[in-house]
Amino acid sequence: MCPLRSNSTRGVLAFRGTDLNTSQSSGQADTCADAFLQLDLKHSLPPWCNQFTLHQLDYLSRALEFAERIVGAYPSIHWLYTGHSLGAALAQLVAAQRGASAATFSAPALKPLLPRLQNPTLRTWGAVTFYDQYDPLRFTALNELWNANCTWHRSSAPTGCHECEERIIDMHSDVCEECFMKAHIFKNYLELVLSGKRPDCHQRHVHDPFLV
């Protein structure tokens, strides 16, 4: 959460992305929580996720609770929700539930996750997500986003990215893993933001059954 001046009317609430170090409990929990968020509830989590309770792995419910507490503590603040990767998904979904605005980095496909929400306020939900041109998640999220998305273009592709893009995206393949580490990780996005280079943005207008 961004520190607020006493006279401020705006605040930023950020959700971190996945801890990729799965040798530690933080990374293990994040991997399981990501699977839980994406999970078709007809299937079960991998057995090694049993070291965590479902309450611990339900990051979306915990994010919604946290946002509720923050809004209650600062009722006059207009909140912008942000995050990267898994954090981007949480920020977008919290904003959708609250009818607020979100600006995120490398969000996964969002439309399949909307049924996780109860009575979201989509008509006043404003969303924009930013991508590196070669981020594998950008390709998996195409046509599954909401409102605007923006892309930073590169003069050349990182190693592995062309090969990853040329086939069905398989995040477990060597080429996609190599591309992922060059184009997806938060360090890359931080460098893009600090570069001052403006991404190209466009607005998508899509009919969605949630708005009927």
Image (cartoon, grey):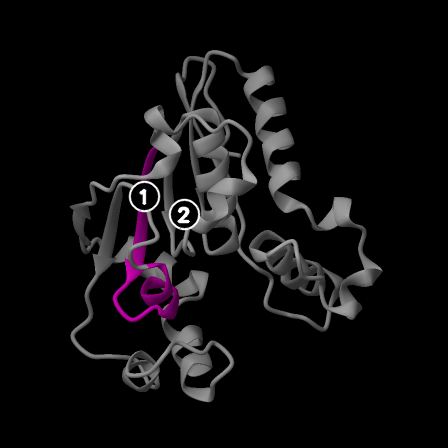
**Which residue lies at the image location 79% right of the left edge and 69% below the top edge?**
47
Q: Nearer the viewer, residue 165 or 67?
A: 165
Question: Which segment is the magenta one?
Answer: 125-141
Q: Nearer the viewer, residue 189 or 134?
A: 134
Q: In the figure, is residue 130 to the left or right of 46?
A: left
Q: Position of residue 76 (x, y in %)?
A: 46, 11
**Which residue lies at the image location 66% right of the left edge and 57% below the top edge?**
42
**Which residue lies at the image location 64% right of the left edge and 45% below the top edge?**
59
Residue at mark 2 = 111
Q: Amino acid at mark 2?
A: Lys
**Which residue lies at the image location 33% right of the left edge and 61% below the top edge?**
191
Nearer to us: label 1 or label 2 = 2
Q: Nearer the viewer, residue 16 or 97?
A: 97
Residue at mark 1 = 146
Residue 147 quadrant: top left
Q: Look at the picture and state if 182 lies above or below 77.
A: below
Q: Amino acid at mark 1?
A: Trp
Residue 126 drawn in magenta: yes
Q: In the figure, is residue 14 to the left or right of 161?
A: right
Q: In the figure, is residue 89 to the left or right of 45?
A: left
Q: Is residue 125 visible?
A: no
Q: Element type at marker 2?
A: helix
Marks 1/2 in contact by CB < 8 Å: the verdict is yes
- The first of marks 1 and 2 along the sequence is 2
